[in-house]
Image: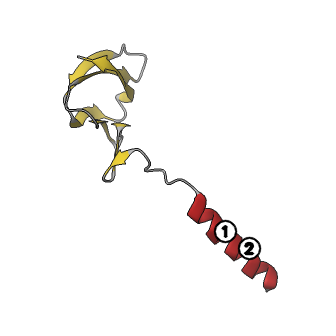
Amino acid sequence: MRILTAIGGALAALALTVTPASAGTTGTLACGWDPSGAVAYYNHCGSSDWVLIRVEQTFDRPGYDQCVRPGRTLLGMLYDINYAWAKGPC
């Protein structure tokens, strides 16, 4: 029983020191690439300027560049979009 108590205490201490997965977010939304369920989003946080993002598509289709304003932008269905990342200002 003492071993289980010690393990439980160690796990509780470890849980308090682990950085949450939501670090670098605004509210509950992740900054940058932000898929949610079956939908792909890009969430531009920080500045009030528009940013140029690169959207990588699935199925060997070519990617494309898109300017997005601050906030969350719908990119499409997750099965069509593989990833998106910021390239710089528009």
Residue drawn at the location 59% of the way across and 64% of the way down: 15
According to the image, label 1 marks what residue? 11
Colouring scheme applied when the structure was drawn? secondary structure
Residue 1 in view of the camera: yes
Q: Is residue 20 above or below residue 38?
A: below
Of residues 67 and 76, which is closer to you in this image?
A: 67
Q: Circle 2 is placed at which residue position?
A: 7
Badge number at residue 65? none
Q: Is residue 58 left or right of residue 49?
A: right
* Image coordinates for residue 39, horizontal then vertical, percent: 30, 40
Residue 49, given in percent of the width and then of the height, sits at: 20, 27
Mark 2–mark 1 distance (CA, rounded to whole Å): 6 Å
What quarter of the picture does the C terminus occupy? top left
Q: Amino acid at mark 1?
A: Leu
Label 2 environment density (alpha carbons within 10 Å; few <14, some 14–19, many ≥20): few
Residue 83's place in the image compared with 52, above or below, is below
Residue 7 is left or right of residue 43, and the answer is right
Q: Position of residue 31 (x, y in %)?
A: 35, 39
Query: Callout 1: 10 Å neighbours few (<14), some, many (20+)?
Result: few
Residue 66's image quarter?
Answer: top left
Q: Is label 2 in a helix, a strand or a loop?
A: helix
Q: Is residue 26 left or right of residue 90?
A: right
Name the one closer to the observer, 61 or 63. Answer: 63
Relative vertical location of residue 63 with respect to residue 77 in this rendering, above or below:
above
Q: Residue at x 48, y 50 (%)?
A: 21
Quick check: marks 2 and 1 in contact, CB under 8 Å? yes
Q: Secondary structure at mark 1?
A: helix
Outermost bottom residue: 1
